[in-house]
Image (spheres, grey):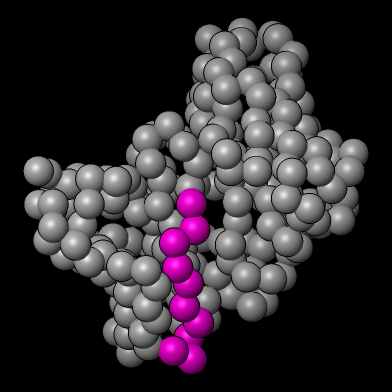
């Protein structure tokens, strides 16, 4: 079966540094990838997505990198701020089953002053 | 304000009770979802409604009964639940099923089953 795993359950980052959150996946059929952020007491919030025909996409302070060869996805956050403290989910989708997004277990990012 | 409102935010119920969770979205979306979030487990999709029609039931036990009277409202009726059903139940909406992966989530209803 497919799986979505994260390399680290918790990532501690100093304010102002860059953060990198990694995600490994096993389903080769996945062609759509999304990162969500969940702050304490709130629902998940969409951050950025990328389709399999791309290997990099940039947003505001965030960059998603996709390496289909090794089935690896990463989220980079530039100049991490206290408001970036949250759980980050790597999410897999597919054009044939997009209604069934598969969420990973999440990485807790803690930003320290 | 996320545009998706869930009530109640917290609910404690016994195993013999009947209760309902409510979700309302003010975004003009046509697809609505119920997800279950348990401690130390990934989010689990429960149900999907697209244009008021149920399109996904992810093998959810019948003690959970969804209802979608219109594209703006979604309910989850609960009866004879088990303690392991205690979790955060998240409602989400999207423009329609089959679009982008951008779901808009509510803040969830924290359910405790005694």
Give the x, y percent position of residue A90: 40, 62
The stretch drawn in magenta includes residue B32: no
Q: Which image quadrant is residue B17 in?
A: top right
Q: Is residue A20 visible?
A: yes
Q: Is residue A79 above or below residue A51?
A: above
Q: Which image quadrant is residue B9 in?
A: top right
Give the x, y percent position of residue B80: 70, 17
Q: Is residue B90 above or below residue B14?
A: below
The stretch drawn in magenta includes residue A53: yes
Residue at left offset 84%, top offset 48%: B71
Residue at left offset 22%, top offset 52%: A81
Q: Is residue A104 visible?
A: no
- How many marks the image carries: the answer is 0
Q: Is residue A5 left or right of residue A32?
A: left
Would you say the magenta stretch is mainly helix, strand or loop? strand
Give the x, y percent position of residue A69: 33, 89
Q: Which image quadrant is residue B14 in?
A: top right
Residue extent of the magenta highlight: A45-54
Give the x, y percent position of residue A74: 29, 72
Which quadrant is the C terminus of chain A positioned in?
A: top left
Q: Is residue A46 left or right of residue B51?
A: left
Q: Is residue A93 left or right of residue B91?
A: left
Q: Nearer the viewer, residue B38 or B83?
A: B38
Residue at left offset 58%, top offset 66%: B101
Residue at left offset 71%, top offset 34%: B23
Q: Is residue B7 above or below residue A103?
A: above
Q: Is residue A13 left or right of residue B5?
A: left
């Amino acid at each position: 079966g497919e799986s979505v795993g994260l390399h680290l359950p918790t990532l501690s980052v100093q304010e102002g540094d860059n953060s990198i959150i990694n995600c490994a996946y096993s389903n080769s059929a996945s062609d759509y990838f999304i990162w969500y952020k969940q702050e304490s007491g709130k629902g998940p919030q969409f951050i950025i997505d990328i389709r399999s025909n791309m290997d990099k996409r940039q947003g505001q302070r965030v960059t998603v990198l996709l390496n289909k060869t090794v089935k690896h996805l990463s989220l980079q956050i530039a100049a991490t701020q206290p408001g970036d403290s949250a759980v980050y989910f790597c999410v897999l989708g597919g054009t044939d089953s997009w209604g069934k997004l598969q969420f990973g277990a999440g990485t807790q990012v803690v930003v320290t002053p | 304000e996320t545009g998706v409102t869930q009530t109640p935010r917290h609910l404690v119920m016994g195993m013999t009770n009947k209760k309902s969770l409510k979700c309302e979205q003010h975004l003009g979306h046509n697809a609505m979802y119920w997800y279950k979030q348990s401690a130390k487990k990934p989010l689990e999709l429960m149900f999907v409604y697209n244009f008021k029609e149920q399109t996904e039931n992810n093998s959810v036990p019948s003690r959970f009964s969804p209802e979608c009277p219109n594209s703006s409202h979604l309910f989850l009726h609960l009866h004879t639940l088990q303690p392991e059903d205690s979790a955060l139940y998240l409602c989400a909406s999207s423009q329609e099923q089959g679009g982008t992966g951008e779901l808009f989530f509510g803040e969830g209803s924290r359910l405790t089953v005694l």
